[in-house]
Image (cartoon, coloured by chain):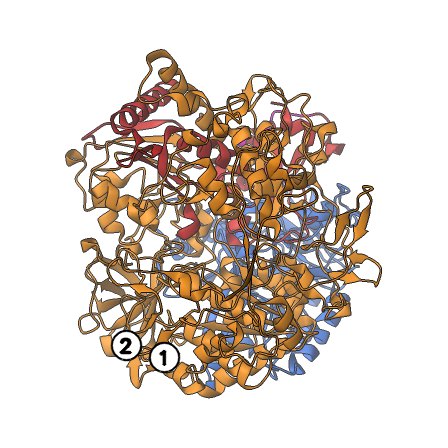
Amino acid sequence: MADYAIFWDASKCTGCKGCQSACKCWNLLPSPLGKNVNEPTGSYQSPLDLNGNTRLLMTFQENEVSDDKKWGVEWSIGRRSCMHCVNPACATVCPSGALSVDEDTGFVRVQDDKCIGCQYCSGVCPFDVPRYYAGGSRINKCTACLDRVKNGGAKPVNGGTGTGNPRYSVPACVHTCSPAALDFGTREDMLAKAYARVQFLQNKPVNPCSTASVYGDVQLEGTHVIMVLKYAPETYGLPADPKVGILPTLTSWMKPLAAFVGVATIAGLGLSYITGLGYKRDTLHFDPDTEETIDMDTGEVVCVGDGHGHKIRAAADAASDAAVAAVATVADKAQEGEE
Amino acid sequence: MDLTRRSFVKSIGLAFGTSMAYGLATQSSTLAFADDLDWRLVNTEEFTNICCYCSGGCGTIVSVQDNELINLEGDSDHPINQGGLCAKGASMFQLRNVITEETREVIHNPNRKTHPLVRRPGASEWEQLSWDQAILEIARHVKETRDATFVEQDENGVTVNRTEAIASLGGSQQNCEEDYLILKTMRSLGVVALDNQARV
Amino acid sequence: MTGHWCDFKNADVIISCGSNNVENHPESARWCHTAVDNGATWIVVDPRFTRTAAVADIYCPMRSGTDITFWGGMINYIIEHDLWQHEYVLNYTNATYLINPDYNFDVTTGLFSGWDEEHKKYVTTTWGYQTEETVAPNTATGGAFAYTLGEGVPEFTPPSKLVPKKDATLSDPLCSFNVFKEHYSRYDLDTVCNVCGMDRETLELVYATYASSGAPEKSGAILYALGQTQHHYGSQNTRIMSLVQLLLGNVGVAGGGVNALRGEPNVQGATDMAMLVYDFPGYLKWPTVASHSTLREWLEHETYSDGYYVNKPKFFISALKEWFGDNATADNDYGYDWLPKIGSRDYTTISTFELIDEGIIKGYFAWGMNPMNSTPNAKFARQAMSKLDWLVSVDWVETATAAFWKAPDLDPAQIQTEVYHLPAALIYEKSGTIANSGRWLQWRYKALDPADEALPDYEICDRLWKQITSLYTDEGGACPEPILNVKWDYHIDGQIDPRAVAMALNGYKKQPGDDGDWDSRELLTTFANLQANGTTACAIWIYSGFYGNSEARYDPSQQNVGKRSLEDKGGLGLYQEWAYAWPVNRRVLYNRASADMEGKPWNPARKVVEWTGEKWDNNDVPDFVAASTAADGTSVPVPPNNKAFMMTWEQNARFVCSTMKDMPLPEHYEPLESPTDNILNGRQNSPCIMFADHPSVQKGDRSEFPIAATTYSVVEHWQTGAQTRGCPVLVEAMPDQFIEMSVELAEEKGIANGDKVRVWNNRGDVQLTAFVTRRLRPLQVNGEVCHLVGMIHHWDWTGDYSTGDTVNDLSPNVGDPNSYIPEYKAFLVNVEKI
């Protein structure tokens, strides 16, 4: 499997929000059309967080520093979006195949037509990224513009049709980045670029940045977004030591038992919706031998495992009437939360 | 004028076969669940243009199908911006088309005013009128104002051929050719109060 | 811009002063970053810590409106530490020229010599040179003015050259350089810190870092924008940057320059095209009664005695020939008298509202411009607007100008103005040429038809022109000749067409009776072919050659303007084969100055031009006389000389100069409304400040309005916001108008981040959201604490998605005497929590 990554360099990013804008325009994501409905945020950051229609957001945080020669301030301008973990907990827990690891690139692919609105992914994401639209029923998160990556390149990545035009071969955000803070390439190349950049920043004769660091190499066994940070990760809204939520651990633990304790699996999932996550819809069946998830209505395989436990799908055949009813409530809540 | 077809850069994506009617209605929507890997720019023609915001002169690629805008992004062949566009430039698509919140449909931006309008004296609303009517009324205003105020010679007998009563402002939003036509129109009427955004 | 965007990468030091360039010219970030990656240092001098400061290396605060003090201090520092580039200064500038012995600057009064108190203006004679000798114009064969004797050339007397006295040893105190040095000796470090408000250590670091570009092989680039120009001495702010750059030898080199980052997509083109009261296309002068009452007067007043502008009559007559076509003849002075002549009144943007208020202007066209939002003292302006008989707004959206009668403080029932909104095509819905800030002319291809009934501006203008001429043809009227004699033949296949206009801008050989014949005219390839005898027609001489391929006249992609090759001879990012930079595809202006007196590049790695000993070997089109034509018609190389600035009659750049209205050397004055007194001289404001006496200005005093305010833009919005507030994604990304203030001021006023606050002065009263930030801090100015606030200005009452108050209700309608630019960047307000 080829491993690709989005590279982002905080020392070059000017917070122009070209990426935020291009993401919406390429992916045809709406912004509010009402008059004066966007709340002032008291910051350059707007909206304040990701939402059902916003997959990428520039963040702004001012840090008071003692060095008066630097005007007593550092301004951390950050990039908030899916980090595309190398081992994505969201794809691990996704029961419907809406989230999966793209074999060609390693990015977490999104097929929102398959989303059942269970919102497990939200519970496990170390970066609190997944958001939902359509009344909380469908996932909205960064797709790494796999439509561009697979179709746009002169040498199309496996599975794409290819247009012969390299200008479209990178995600929309990378393509539009005026200060060239964003880049796209193999994860190996992007990591090398990141470490070289950190070296450069730390050793500049004027204004050296001793706190410069790479983020996304070691964190969580790595991510497919490689960042060069100038200041502490927390000032960019990034956890210094990101942790996966409880569910995937549970799922992993359940995996060897799945063949004979399907009930336990279901119980585990039931627990999750009680804790505030939704679950509903089609009847799916997981075959532990093939690691395939099968739609019991159509007989189609909706998700295929990779043999390394990364694509375990929980069987959903116990989706009871009660669970469906509960989901409606949760979905309503989710919608309220969004609005 | 067949300028566009003649001069345009190249078209792409023809692998998908024959052209189909592709207006706004079929351009969306996520709710219709297009496959996430489907390529949007099928059967589109591309045209190069230049951004309409600051004076960087950043190149853009405008993708069009059946006379409707499909996509607009930076021109990666352009030496200045190399594909880059800022928040404003990257949203030039929305000058024409926006996406609805409920159904994620692509529609023409309702904020744009695409018909000639007039506000009559004392009125509190616009009225729509035809182009011919608008042009005739404006030409009539111009002539009446000019005829009433035109000065051929000043108090010292110098030929001045001017009217102070008409002002014309703007030019930084237009192309150079348009500026020349506006300049020529206004100066030939005798306009001296002619200025543009260079100071603001 | 003397250079262009990609050229920033060649700099060793970049200083962004008066420009938040990564925010308002985001693409510049790529090129500044490249310079830093190559080892450059990037300095930001700005009243607040901006997005640009966040990515640059050194940040230095400065009180808004004190740029001349900052740069004057740098000049003093450079001279004191002997960091200036001697060979450059002594040869390529007027450093050695002797200034009139009556020149003087009186520190106690703050006045230069020549002040006429009665007329409130300077007589600038004493700012000029002492004359060594007078040389008569050479009209002999081969002489610069031989052409004036040709048939068809209007009669006029070319000027004699007054050869200035010089002292190459610089021992005469009246040497331009010595006068200059003496003038800035008062601008010491402590004075600068007192006036501008930064600390001395930071200031010295900035000066030392930037002055390092004075080493011959080093380049320093100044990036500036409206932060320096929008003051009542804004022209002098730009001039003092030029002086710094000359001193350091940074003009004409790759990675140098005085780089105006212009604010609108085609403001460069609009300025080239003379969409300005006093201009004629190509930086010639529009006729005024005072200096140009006849064609002869125009030619005698405007033609230079030496340098390239000895050819000005060729440019002007060719433009008249294009304007009037066959109707322009030698006998009728090529139609000169039909052009309107400007009298003694001013008609620039600020003045138009005074003229409307007085009932003089009755009709108003706004072409993609929105003065109801963007003009200073906007409240006064919109009240004046109600007195118009009619108003036409040509735009994409309903602007505040089109909808001024809907303003919250106006009653439409009381307004008798008839208002038209004409829907314009978007930029990708039409074709044509646009000029960027680096003077690159690029072609925009129409991608699709305009939505609904919208039309390109060129078509709207054509319809209007045809209707007006038809009314005058049918009915007669006041003096119809200037209208009916105009040549208006810009149609191809019966349709108005920008390609025909492009050919007119480019120029062509004019044959009698060929008006309207675009199929066969021979297009010109350079303005060197222009004639003053009516045989050539060219609307704007500086564009000549941009659309000169007669073989493919209807195909812009086959013209220079349509070039798309990424070839980069010399590797400096000049991209000689991409589009076309006016003039003559020159990418770096004054490029002769990139090489020493022997013609060797100061820095061989950044060679722009080079004399090999036998000929010039160049990476750019030379901006000097590189070759002459011998008697047998062959081209002969001209060896290097000191004529590095051929667009001035001296062919040298100027330290002391007599061509500006307000000062021979930039001197510090305070903004009209200032939080402090001028400590550098005895006069608070420039004596030449414009419009300050108008009653609508209502100057505020610092006792009532103690807070210094400035205005600026954010990357998410643009100018009056009419376009960007119409894009939902941008409204979402920056939903509201804010005022930035320091933590200290917020505490003093009891304001928390996100609070709604009232900001007011004598002119206006607006409500904004407070951003309380550490990026703005109170400054120590002349021993007192000075609070500064900053506001963005992209909102008004129009638009479907986001509305707000009009911040320009607060800015004062006073301006600069050279450029008439308003003072948006420094005025006084007060602030309170609502």
Type of amino acid at the residue the image marks with label 2: Thr
Please tell me how crowded label 2 is: few (under 14), some (14-19), or many (20+) other residues with Cα within 10 Å.
some
- Check the picture and name the quadrant holding the C terminus of chain C: bottom left
Task: Answer above or below: position of C49 versus A333.
Answer: below
Colour applied to chain B: red
Residue A76 visible here: no
Q: Which residue is mark 2?
A: C676
> Mark 2 touching mark 1, by CB under 8 A?
yes
Magenta stretch in the rendered image:
B19-24
Colour applied to chain A: blue
Task: Answer above or below: position of A43 versus C802.
Answer: below
Which chain is disc 2 placed on? Answer: C
Q: Say which mark, if any, is on residue C414.
A: none
Q: Which residue is mark 1?
A: C195
- Check the picture and name the quadrant holding the N terminus of chain C: bottom right
Residue at 58% in and 44% down: A113
**Disc 2 to disc 1, how far (Cα)?**
9 Å
Q: Position of residue B135 (x, y in %)?
A: 37, 22
Q: Position of residue C39 (x, y in %)?
A: 68, 75
Q: Secondary structure at mark 1?
A: helix
- Indicate which disc, 2 or 1, sits on the residue closer to the N terminus: 1
- Nearer-the-camera pick, C99 or A185: C99
Q: Secondary structure at mark 2?
A: loop
Type of amino acid at the residue the image marks with label 1: Val
